[in-house]
Image (cartoon, rainbow, N blue to C red):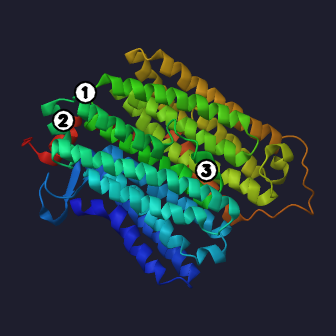
Amino acid sequence: MNNLLVVPMILPILMGVLLVFLRPYIRLQRLVSVITLALSAGVAAYCLVHIHQTGIMRLDFGDWLPPHGILFVGDSFAMLLVLAACVVSGIILLYAFVTTGVETEKMFFYPFFLFLVAGVNGSFLTGDLFNLFVCFEVMLLASYVLLTLGGRKTQLKEGITYVLINVLASWFFLLGVAYLYGAIGTLNMAHIAVRVSEVGQGPLLTLISIVFLLVFSLKAGLLLYFWLPGSYAAPPTAVAALFGALLTKVGIYALYRMFTLIFVHDPLIFRMIGVLAIVTMVGGCLGAIAYSDIRQIVSYNVIISVGFVLAGLAISNQTAFQGASYYLVHDMVSKALLFLLAGTVVYLTGRSKFTELSGLIRNYPLVGWLFFLTMLAIAGIPPLSGFIGKVYLGLGAIETGSYMLLAVAFLSSIGVLYSLLRIFLNSFWGETTISEDDQVPFEKSLGLPLVLLATLVVGMGIGAELLAPYIQDAANTLSDPELYIRAVLGDDLE
C-alpha cells in the first residue's frame, strides 16, 4: 500500500522520458500526458482517504529504515496538495491543447510539463531534506525550459532574471543543508526535529533557520517577490497558469513543513514571518492596483495570496492551520482559473491592458461571468471556496490576538477585489469595441477547462464539508509535530 506514495512522482517522470521519444506524435503525447495526470490524481485521492482512515503513510526506499535512508512521507497536508496539483495541472493541460501550438508542442513541451509536476509532487512528499533540494531542482529545471520555450524576447529577458534568482536561492538552500547536517548530523526531517528539540535551538540553529527562511521566501514570492510578476506574465498562458497554481505553493509548503516540524522553538522567527507576510500583502496590493496590464495584475494577486497563506504560519495555531490548508487548495484552483481567464482575454483580443478593452462580456459572456465568479472567490465572498479558508484564518488570528495580521489580511482581500473589479468593469462591462466581423471565434474546447476549474471553485465552497475531515487531519499534523515524527521514527525517537 505504501508503495503508492511514489506514483505521483515516478509516473510523470517515466512518462515524460517516454514522450521524449514520441516527439512527432502530438496527439499521442497529449493522450499520454492526460492519462498520466489522471492516474496520479486517482492514486493521490486514494492515498488521502487511506491516510484519513489509518494514519500517515511512509515509504522507505531500498528498505533502509529511517533515519538512514531516503523516504517519502504522506500526511494529509502533503497529500491534499499533491491531489490538487495533479487535478489542476491536468485541467491546465486541456487548455494547452488548444492554445500552445504544434511547433511549441514539438519542442518537448509535454515531457517538461510532466517533469515539473513530478518535481512539485516529490517536494510535497519527501521526508528527507536533501531529497527536497533534488525535487526542487527537478521542478526548477523544467520551469526554466517552459518559461523560455518559444524564444520570444520577453520570455528570454524574464527567464534570465528567473534563472539567476532561483540559482542563487538553490545555492543558499544547499548551504543551509550543509550547515544543518554539520550541526545535527542527519537530513531526515523527523530526525532533525528530534535532534533540535534535544539540543535546543541555539544561535547557530536560529541562524540556519533564517537561511532556510530566506531560501523558501525567495521561492514562494514572500517579500522578495520582485522577480515574480514578470516571470509569470511572460510565458504562454498554460505555462503561466501552471506557475501561478503550483510553483509558489512548493515554497509555502516547505516553509510550513520546516517551521512547524523543526524550527518551532524560537518565537522571533514567527514574528519575522508575520512581518514578511504583512509587507508582502501590502506590496502585492500596491502592485495589483498600480498596473493596467491584466497579466501583471494577476501575477501580483499571486503575491497577495502568498502573504495571506503565510499569515497562518505566523499565527501558528490549529485553527489558522485549518484555514491555511483550505486556502492553499483553493488558491491552486482559483489562481489557475484566473491566469487562464486573463490569458484567454489576451488570446481573443490581442491586447493585455484593460484600458484598451471594453464590453467583452457581450462578445464572450462565458469568459466574462467566469471572471466575475473567480474574482468573488479569490476575494472570499461566500459561499465560494475562498471564504472558508479566510474565516478559519481570521478565527485563528483572534485566538492569538494577532489583530495586525488579521487587519492586513482582510484589507488585502479588499485590494484583491478592487484590482480585479477594475479589470471586470473596464474590460467586460460597457459598450463593446469589437464588431462581429472582427470577433475571434470562441472554441468550445477553450471553454471546457475554464468551466471545470470554475466548477471546482464553486464545489469546494458549497461542498466544504467533504474536505473538512482531511483539512482537520492536515491541521492536526501541523499543530502536533509528534504525529509526523512518530509516523517516521516509530516509538524509538533516539
* Residue 55 can be seen, yes or no: no
Q: Position of residue 168 (x, y in %)?
A: 44, 51
Image: 300 above or below 170: above
Q: Quadrant of residue 314?
A: top left
Q: Is residue 479 left or right of residue 170?
A: left
Residue, disc 2: 196
Are dots 2 and 1 in contact, CB under 8 Å? Answer: yes
Q: Nearer the viewer, residue 202 or 140?
A: 202
* Residue 247 can be seen, yes or no: yes
Are dots 3 and 2 in contact, CB under 8 Å? Answer: no
Q: Quadrant of residue 286?
A: top right
Which residue is rendered at x = 57% and y = 53% of the image?
161
Of circles 3 and 2, the one toward us is: 2
Of circles 3 and 1, the one toward us is: 1
Q: Nearer the viewer, residue 201 or 305?
A: 201
Instruction: Specify the quadrant that holds the N terminus.
Output: bottom left
Q: Position of residue 329 (x, y in %)?
A: 46, 44
Q: Earlier in the sequence, mark 3 or mark 2?
A: 2
Q: Earlier in the sequence, mark 3 or mark 1?
A: 1
Q: Determine the secondary structure under disc 2.
A: helix
Q: Determine the secondary structure under disc 1.
A: loop
Real-space CA distance between mark 3 and mark 2, rounded to the nearest whole angstrom: 41 Å
Q: Amino acid at mark 3?
A: Leu
Q: Quadrant of residue 183?
A: top left
Residue, disc 1: 265
Real-space CA distance between mark 3 and mark 1, rounded to the nearest whole angstrom: 38 Å
Q: Determine the secondary structure under disc 3.
A: helix
Residue, disc 3: 337
